[in-house]
Image (cartoon, helix red, strand yellow):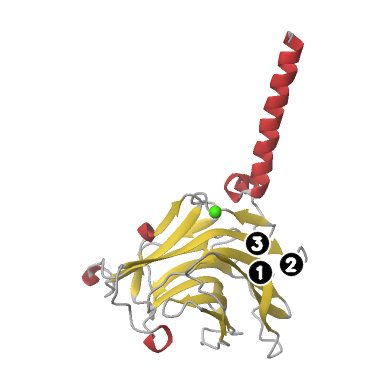
Amino acid sequence: MNFKSIFTVSFTILAVLLISGRSNSLTSVSSSLADFSYPENHWKDNFDNLNAELWRVYENFTWENNNSYMQSDNVEFKKGILGISMIKGNLKPDFFRGRSNSCGSLFTVPFKDNSGYDFKYGKYVVRMKAATGSGVVSSFFLFRWDPWQEVDVEFLGKDTTKIHLNVFFNEEGNNANEDPIILPLGYDAAADFHTYAIEWEKDHISWYVDGKCVWTKTTPAGKIPYKGMYLAMNVWNCTSSDWVGPLFTDEPKKRTAYYDWVEYFPSGSY
Ligand SMILES: [Ca+2]
């Protein structure tokens, strides 16, 4: 091998490395967010680590019907999997707005302005495994406040063989005008990973399980959310025990939902 051949081979290896690096940057949000100016473009996050340019982890936060308090420790990335946990009884309630349980949450960062309501029509897909435990909610959802609009995929730890789909719609203000539906899955969502998708378009919302459409909402006419929202995942303990059941008493105290990846397709691209 003469010098020219070595140079050519070296250059080829370098080019392959550069191209493969470029290729990775096209499929991994982690390395492509440097030019991620438009979050409504197609993207996928494989959750190899926390991409702080795309996600924020809630710390020291809760809300009225949440019987747990958000701690960033409950959001973990291990071996390409995001784990979000709810832990029973690990907090001193005096310091955590009366909550003795902790939980976790991941929300998209604000891209265009401080509201964070940057996402709109398109298809949102997650590959996840729900958390077990009565009282525990695992979720994948779109949300905005004032007016309150929301599109949900939820699993209740008391029965992870069902999926809860919901839409909150308000023209103005934050009334809880919702339209929930519960569907049997035919399997246990806590036993293995499956894909779940929200297809949000101007005239309908459809939900998919493992690529198959399981529910579409088109009515009442005009009651489809139309304002930008952020995308989120959380695992928490709801105080509405008539919905989620009483908080579990069995072990372990830590209950985790696992998320393998999230992918977004802009409207018209799928
Ligand atoms: Ca992954």
Q: Position of residue 110 (x, y in %)?
A: 55, 60
Which mark is drawn over residue 264?
A: 3
Near mark 2 (Cα within 10 A), the count class, few <14, some 14-19 or many ≥20, is some
Q: Position of residue 98 (x, y in %)?
A: 26, 75
For the residues labelled 1 and 2, say whether their Cβ atoms are less than 8 Å apart.
Answer: yes
Under circle 1, the secondary element is loop
For the residues labelled 3 and 2, say whether their Cβ atoms are less than 8 Å apart.
Answer: no
Q: Which residue is mark 2?
A: 267
Q: How far is mark 1 from mark 3, CA to CA?
A: 11 Å
Q: Is residue 236 visible?
A: yes
Q: Quadrant of the C terminus?
A: bottom right
Q: Position of residue 22 (x, y in %)?
A: 68, 39
Q: Which residue is mark 1?
A: 120
Q: How far is mark 3 from mark 2, CA to CA?
A: 9 Å
Comparing labels 1 and 2, the label whose residue is closer to the camera: 2
Q: Residue at x 22, y 68 (%)?
A: 92
Q: Position of residue 250 (x, y in %)?
A: 29, 74
- Residue 180 is left or right of residue 98, and the answer is right
